[in-house]
Image (tube, helix red, strand yellow):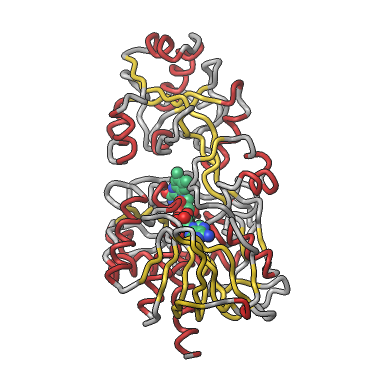
Amino acid sequence: MSGPAVISPDQARFGDEAEVVIVGAGACGLCAALAARDGQADVLVIERDAVPRGTTAMSIGLIPAANTRFQRDRGINDSVELFAGDILKRNNGQTDIDRVHHIVRESAPTIEWLVDKHAIPLSLQNELYAGHSLYRMHGTIGCTGGEVMDALYDASKKAGVRFALETVVDSLFADSNGRIAGVRVTSEGQQRDIACGALILASSGFAANREMVTKHIPAMAKAGAYCHHGAQGDAVRWGEGLGAALGDITAYQSHGGLMVDRPVSVPWAHILRGGIQVNATGKRFSDETSNYAERALDILAQPGGFAWSIYDQQIEDNLAKYVPYVDFLKVGLVLSADSADELCAITGLPPALKDTLREVQDAAAGKSKDPLGRTFRDTKPLTAPFKAVKVTGSLYHTQGGLEVDAQGRVLKADRSPFPNLFAGGGAARGISGAGCAGYLAGNGLLTASVYGRLAGTAAAAQTLTSA
Ligand SMILES: Cc1cc2nc3c(=O)[nH]c(=O)nc-3n(C[C@H](O)[C@H](O)[C@H](O)COP(=O)(O)OP(=O)(O)OC[C@H]3O[C@@H](n4cnc5c(N)ncnc54)[C@H](O)[C@@H]3O)c2cc1C
């Protein structure tokens, strides 16, 4: 980060301009770009990386939506009320309830717009994440955020979006009313100023900024971070400089499947399909499915701060559809054992692991109740050959940030909107409440894609009416 957050416009030397400038080319930025181009605006996306990837490409790219035609085609009868109810149940209503309904209402139009208008290859996936009443995750065949990003980037170029890559936005030019005149950027070591009619901040959260994580989310200060290096908290820094309202700044998603000593994460489907996690004593320590986003804290509280994920061949066969999983299978990151004894030997876990396995097999077969209260729904008892991966808890992404209104306009501390400043995705306040317990799987890409579309539409409309 270089330069002040906000500079007076009279110090700018604008050499380039665009009606709508977007900072960040992740899911939010590219959805915003497509929507703004649909609205006939001239759009420039500024991205620090050479190729647009962002946190989005690290994700498995699953976007939840309610009452899409893909659900109806499969006979799934979802509704705004049901999905909003699931989100609010997870966060105990500790969020803006009207905003949740608004975002959920816009979720199906967003998915269908991405597929129908911009050929993003999303379809309904067969993963039932904890807390979701129905199947509503939409993703690509390979279940990778990388595929989503490739498709969004192709569609954006096709739609005539301009890109300034390997270019970092340092500062915003804003007058005393908070009207944004443009941005100061650095590329190839040179600073230059770009004027805009409207600015959309799609620069993600602050998971990669240790100082901010330590300040706002101390529970994750020492955890591993499996996040994108671009998540430096620039939107929050600019917002603070402008006097913007911030919300739920302590919100985040953690994950309990980061491999120890490796920057790779085991898809959570290994747990959803019947896998378990044990600590160094060979015992389970809580219901693995109870809260996906809080799992990291459970694991970090175990002796040594790690757990072993244990699953079996039939679960691994299912994981084969996740491209990143196949990649780490190739390099031997998953241990395999033909019996419970061998599993103890290769993991170094005590024989108590065999009792744990028996207990879980009985619960999954319906012979007994799981002592930790887990319901083994749609899963089969674990059988040899067993698979084992040593994992720990990590921070994935943050969910707090700039307060925005229904169109994605950034709000001032007095709750009035800035004239021409928008935000979405990780840059804006999410819908998960504070902390991590309220994160329902999919809240990240849901708000990135929906707010991207809404902000892009509103920004284009605004610049065209003011032209
Ligand atoms: C491993 C993992 C798995 C996940 N799985 C899911 C999932 O399945 N479903 C789900 O809903 N969510 C998931 N999430 C969360 C989800 O990925 C994020 O919520 C979402 O990608 C955020 O999108 P975004 O567009 O706001 O940010 P990003 O995709 O991070 O894009 C922001 C972009 O802005 C750029 N940028 C930042 N600052 C600047 C600057 N100053 N100048 C220029 N460029 C800048 C960055 O380089 C980056 O490319 C997952 C996250 C992780 C880490």
Q: Which residue is drawn at the image coordinates 47% and 34% (left, top)?
A: 257
Return the residue nearer the eye: 336 or 291: 336
Tell me how many marks there are. Answer: 0
Question: In this view of the protein, can residue 72 be seen by the observer?
Answer: no
Question: In this view of the protein, can residue 383 be seen by the observer?
Answer: yes
Return the residue nearer the eye: 59 or 194: 194
The quarter of the displayed image where residue 50 is located: bottom left
Q: Which residue is drawn at the image coordinates 39% and 73% (left, top)?
A: 35
Drawn side of residue 44 relative to residue 125, left or right: right
Residue 112, relative to residue 352: is it above or below?
below
Residue 116, relative to residue 299: is it above or below?
below
Return the residue nearer the eye: 177 or 3: 3
The quarter of the displayed image where residue 365 is located: top left
Return the residue nearer the eye: 37 or 6: 6
Q: In what quadrant of the picture does the N terminus appear?
A: bottom right
Drawn side of residue 284 relative to residue 54, left or right: right
Task: Provide residue 126's location: percent of width, then percent of height.
Answer: 33, 47
Task: Provide residue 105's location: percent of width, then percent of height.
Answer: 47, 68
Task: Provide residue 7's location: percent of width, then percent of height.
Answer: 64, 72
Residue 429, relative to residue 260: is it above or below?
below
Task: Provide residue 448's location: percent of width, then percent of height.
Answer: 47, 61
